[in-house]
C-alpha cells in the first residue's frame, strides 16, 4: 500500500514540514509530509529522522529538477493541525 492509501485507511499520525536545499542550485524549498497512523509510525521529529519513512521520500527541485537535496530542518505541526 502507498502512504496515501494508508492515510485514507488509518488517518494521520503526524504532519511535518521538511526544509530542503537543492544540492545542485542551492534553492531552498519546503515540503509537507503526512505520516500514516500505523503501528510504530514516527510521531515526533526524532523518531521521523530515525525511521525508514524518510528513506521513502523523493525530491525533485522545482528549478533545476535535481533529485538530490539536503534536509536542513524539520518542523512538526501541532496535533490539531495534522488531522
Image: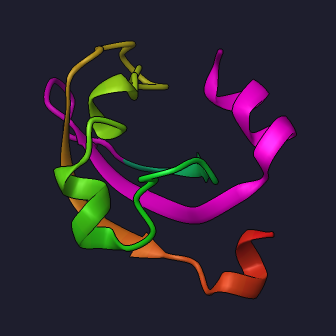
Left or right, residue 68 beside residue 14: left
Where is residue 11 shown, x and y percent of the image? 78, 53
Where is residue 20 shown, x and y percent of the image? 30, 48
Residue at position x 29%, y 14% in the image? 66
Per the image, is 81 magenta? no
Q: Which residues are magenta?
A: 1-28
Where is residue 78 shown, x and y percent of the image? 61, 86
Residue at position x 75%, y 79% in the image? 81
Q: Is residue 22 above or below residue 44?
A: above
Q: Is residue 32 above or below residue 44?
A: above
Q: In terms of depth relative to the viewer, which is nearer, 66 or 56? A: 56
Left or right, residue 24 beside residue 15: left
Quarter holding the N terminus is top right
Hey, which residue is sitting farthest front in the picture?
39
Q: In terms of depth relative to the viewer, which is nearer, 73 or 42? A: 42
Per the image, is 22 magenta? yes
Where is residue 24 shown, x and y percent of the image? 16, 23
Q: Which of the 4 image quadrants contains residue 23?
A: top left
Q: In terms of depth relative to the viewer, which is nearer, 36 or 73? A: 36
By what rule are the colours in the image chosen? rainbow
Quarter holding the C terminus is bottom right
Amino acid at each position: 500500500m502507498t502512504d496515501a492509501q494508508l492515510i485514507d485507511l488509518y488517518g494521520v499520525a503526524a504532519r511535518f514540514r521538511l526544509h530542503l536545499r537543492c544540492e545542485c542550485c542551492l534553492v531552498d524549498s519546503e515540503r509537507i509530509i503526512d505520516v500514516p497512523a500505523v503501528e510504530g509510525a514516527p510521531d515526533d521529529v526524532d523518531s521521523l529522522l530515525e525511521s525508514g519513512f524518510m528513506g521513502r521520500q523523493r525530491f525533485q527541485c522545482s528549478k533545476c529538477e535535481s533529485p538530490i537535496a539536503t534536509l536542513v530542518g524539520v518542523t512538526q505541526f501541532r496535533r490539531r493541525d495534522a488531522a
